[in-house]
């Protein structure tokens, strides 16, 4: 599918010209909502892009962005693309070591940094990244630096002073940027291994944005709410580029902790989310009297909301059904960083709860003989940066092998059944997909998360994260106490009570699939401890490693 634009900058410029004085971005600062118009949006991107060229940035160079969600992130992205470079978004919670790896591996020549806290991480590893020549600082103001640093406004002024010469150079570069030109290198979450740099082209992202628009039917009168990290391709495509394509206003939540409060003020038409937030909202709603839930749901998400799109992990079907009963539609979709990201999504008139919908336009999906989902089309990445072996293993004859297991029904709706790498093969040789077990467990009112374990073990166990807002009730019903050690609940009565709920939730499974023993955590899984990704997807290997000794203890004395 060809779009009307040769590249992402052309798309951005077209919307800026068309929607001029209308609000492109809304953000909150000092308790007040501010707006950036489409006219100002282009001015910022052009001036900063020209400033980057003045610093010596060449077409095809890589520039990293290390920042929380803020309006400057959006502008930095378009400025880098305007200069003909590609950006490398780094997740804001990343450690210094993770930042160092991505900067060094990508060969980034510059970096945009938001705060002094983020700059401290970068400064600590500068001597290990010889390719890094400059830094653009939004709020940070270091006393000294081994590389040249420029303020955000200082870079913009450089672009202003470049004048007609700068504009001509931008136009000359943009004339050579096409569908196949590299737009970004996004490092995968690395839930089981070291991150790989996913190369996405302008064409990858443009065609996926158009596919997203065809699905949701949004236009310039709509408002979309962003709270998911822009460094992740899901928010970048579904919020950032879709709003740019349509002329929608994008409201920026202050943080993940304030998103539901911000939604009430922004009153969005569309809302992109992940299952973890919907699970929390569902728990709040279900705790209210049934007669009050519809009004509370509308108060919580606003009266203009048309639908929500959920991705980044499986949405428990009972949550989708309950929200539907309250008049709020959650369309579950599916994709990966390597697929720009959208492969399939439910939509108005084409919706089956428990599936991730049908493939979007120009995307082919089929199931390989071993049950793996494979896909082909303009959304498939160019490859992994500097990793031809991994690229060859992932893309064969144009088909990208997702690593996910699934099935297609007679109407073409895709259902995800788990990850190939996560498949549990017990010591007795039984193959058990953990996702099916986990989906049943999280339907329990007292269980927030569940991670099934048992590969090369004699039986299946599980790590259980309780729903902490209901923990007092669980303690009262069990007659136990909230005693814990090393992040794990030690009280036998409370553990046995949760084991009973696990047994009840899995009673219809075969004996080999049932969870025989559990570890009950005394704290939520933590992004800071690298146990979940920025979209709250569980890093299974990291969690298993963290609680390895406790898992080993579950199997002591068990027959192999």
Image (cartoon, rainbow, N blue to C red):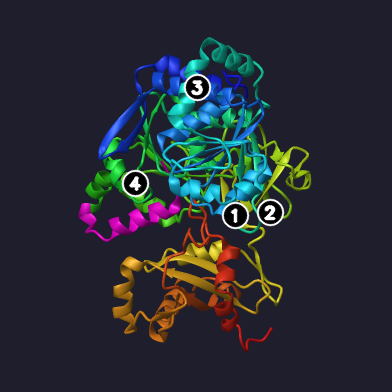
Q: Which residue is mark 2?
A: 371
Furthest toward the bottom, the residue is 557
Closer to the chain start, of discs 2 and 3, is 3
Indicate which label's residue lies in the foreground, 4 or 1: 1
Q: How many residues crowd around disc 4 within 10 Å: few (fewer than 14), some, or many (20 or more)?
A: some
**Label 3: which secondary element:** helix
Q: How many residues crowd around disc 3 within 10 Å: few (fewer than 14), some, or many (20 or more)?
A: many
Q: How many residues crowd around disc 1 within 10 Å: few (fewer than 14), some, or many (20 or more)?
A: few
Q: Which residue is mark 1?
A: 97
**Label 2: which secondary element:** loop
Q: Can you say which quadrant of the picture contains the N terminus?
A: top right
Residue span colored magenta: 272-292
Q: Is residue 345 visible?
A: no
| Rendered position, 67 above or below 426 | above
Q: Which residue is mark 4?
A: 259
Q: Is residue 273 magenta?
A: yes
């Amino acid at each position: 599918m060809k779009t009307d634009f040769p590249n992402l900058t052309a798309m951005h410029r077209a919307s800026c010209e068309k929607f001029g004085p209308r609000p492109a971005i809304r953000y909150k600062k000092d308790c007040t909502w501010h707006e950036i118009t489409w006219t100002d949006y282009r001015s910022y991107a052009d001036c900063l892009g020209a400033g980057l060229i003045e610093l010596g940035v060449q077409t095809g160079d890589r520039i990293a962005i290390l920042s929380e969600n803020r309006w400057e992130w959006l502008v930095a992205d378009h400025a880098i693309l305007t200069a003909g470079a590609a950006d490398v978004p780094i997740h804001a919670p990343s450690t210094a070591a993770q930042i160092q790896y991505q900067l060094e591996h990508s060969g980034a020549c510059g970096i945009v940094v938001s705060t002094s806290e983020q700059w401290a991480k970068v400064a600590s590893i500068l001597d290990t990244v010889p390719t890094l020549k400059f830094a653009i600082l939004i709020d940070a103001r270091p006393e000294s630096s081994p590389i040249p640093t420029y303020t955000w406004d200082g870079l913009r002024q450089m672009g202003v002073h470049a004048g007609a010469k700068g504009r001509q150079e931008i136009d000359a570069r943009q004339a050579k940027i096409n569908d196949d030109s590299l737009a970004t290198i996004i490092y995968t979450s690395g839930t089981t291994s070291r991150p790989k740099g996913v190369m996405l082209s302008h064409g990858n992202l443009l065609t996926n944005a158009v596919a997203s628009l065809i699905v949701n039917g949004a236009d310039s009168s709509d408002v979309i709410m962003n709270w998911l990290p822009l460094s992740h391709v899901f928010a970048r495509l579904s919020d950032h580029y879709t709003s740019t394509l349509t002329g929608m206003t994008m409201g920026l939540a202050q943080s993940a902790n304030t998103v539901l409060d911000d939604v009430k003020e922004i009153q969005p038409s569309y809302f992109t989310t992940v299952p973890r937030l919907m699970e929390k909202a569902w728990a709040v709603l279900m705790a209210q009297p049934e007669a009050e839930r519809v009004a509370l749901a509308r108060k919580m998400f606003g009266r203009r909301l048309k639908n929500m799109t959920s991705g980044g992990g499986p949405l428990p079907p009972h949550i989708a059904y309950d929200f539907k009963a309250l008049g709020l539609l959650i369309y579950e979709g599916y994709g990966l960083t390597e697929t720009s990201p959208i492969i399939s999504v439910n939509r108005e008139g084409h919706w089956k709860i428990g599936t991730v919908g049908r493939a979007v336009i120009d995307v082919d999906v089929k199931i390989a003989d071993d049950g793996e989902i494979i896909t082909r089309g303009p959304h498939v990445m160019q490859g992994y940066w500097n990793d031809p072996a991994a690229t060859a293993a992932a893309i064969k004859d144009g088909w990208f092998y997702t690593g996910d297991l699934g099935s297609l029904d007679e109407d073409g709706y895709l259902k995800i059944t788990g990850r190939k790498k996560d498949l549990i093969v017990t010591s007795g040789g039984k193959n058990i997909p953990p996702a099916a077990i986990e989906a049943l467990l999280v339907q329990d009112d007292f269980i927030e998360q569940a991670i099934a374990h048992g590969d090369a073990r004699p039986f299946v166990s599980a790590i259980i994260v309780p729903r902490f807002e209901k923990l007092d009730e669980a303690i009262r019903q069990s007659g136990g106490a909230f005693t814990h050690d090393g992040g794990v609940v030690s009280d036998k009565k409370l553990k046995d009570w949760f084991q009973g709920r696990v047994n009840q939730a899995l009673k219809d499974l075969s004996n080999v699939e049932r969870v025989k023993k559990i570890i009950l955590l005394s704290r939520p899984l933590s992004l800071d401890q690298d146990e979940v990704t920025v979209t709250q997807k569980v890093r299974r290997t990291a969690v298993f490693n963290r609680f390895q000794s406790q898992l080993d203890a579950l199997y002591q004395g068990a027959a192999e």
